[in-house]
Amino acid sequence: MSDLKVPPPPPSREEAAARWQALAAGEVIREAVHSWAASWVEDEVERGFAPLVFGALQYLHGFDLCQDPNRPGVVWHGISDEGKWIHSLDDIASGLARWQARCEPHDADPLAWPQTEDERLRALIQAREAEDGQG
C-alpha cells in the first residue's frame, strides 16, 4: 500500500468559472476558493491541464493575497481581517470578464486557438517592450 495521495482530477472550465462567479458575487470566501484551487496550483505533478482552466485556477489561488498596510512590500495568502486584500471584488469580477473573453476565441475555433493565443501574447510582449524602450 502506498502513502502517496492520489491527486483529484482537474476541474472543468465550468467548475472554475462557477467558483470565480461565486467569489465575485460574494457568495463564497476567498480562503475557500484558494483552498479549492491550491491542490492543483501547488501540486508539482504535471496533469495536462487545459491552459484556460489552469489560468483560472492560478487566478483563484491568488485572490486571497493580502498586504500589510504597515509594510507594503509584504504579501501573503491571508484570511479575513489579517490585512488589506490586494484584489477588490471589482478586480475579481473584471478579471472574470477578461478570462471569459479569452475563452471566446478558443470556443470559436479550438484547433486554431493555440496559434492565435501565441500571436496575441507575442504582440502583448512586443507592445510592452516598445513602451519600455526595449523594442
Image: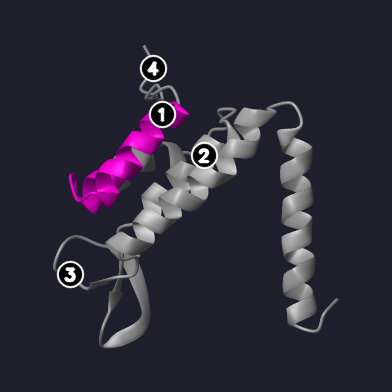
State the mark number for residue 54: 2
- Locate residue 98, reporting x and y percent: 50, 52
Q: Is residue 96 visible?
A: yes
Q: CA distance from mark 2 to mark 4?
A: 28 Å
Q: Is residue 83 left or right of residue 111?
A: left
- Label 4 belongs to which residue? 2
Q: CA distance from mark 1 to mark 2?
A: 12 Å
Q: CA distance from mark 4 to mark 3?
A: 38 Å
Which residue sits at x=58%, y=37%? 104
Answer whether labels 4 and 3 touch (C-beta < 8 Å).
no
- Label 3 belongs to which residue? 82
Answer whether labels 2 and 4 touch (C-beta < 8 Å).
no
N-terminal-most mark, 2 or 4? 4
Which residue sits at x=86%, y=76%? 135
Image quadrant assignment for residue 74: bottom left
Q: Is residue 47 above or below residue 41?
A: above
Q: CA distance from mark 3 to mark 2?
A: 27 Å
- Give the residue type that dot 4 points to: Ser
N-terminal-most mark, 3 or 2? 2
Q: CA distance from mark 3 to mark 1?
A: 31 Å
Q: Tell me the crowding category of disc 2: few under 14, some 14 to 19, or many 20 or more residues within 10 angstroms, Cα based.
A: many
Image quadrant assignment for residue 42: top left
- Give the residue type that dot 1 points to: Glu
Which residue sits at x=58%, y=31%? 50
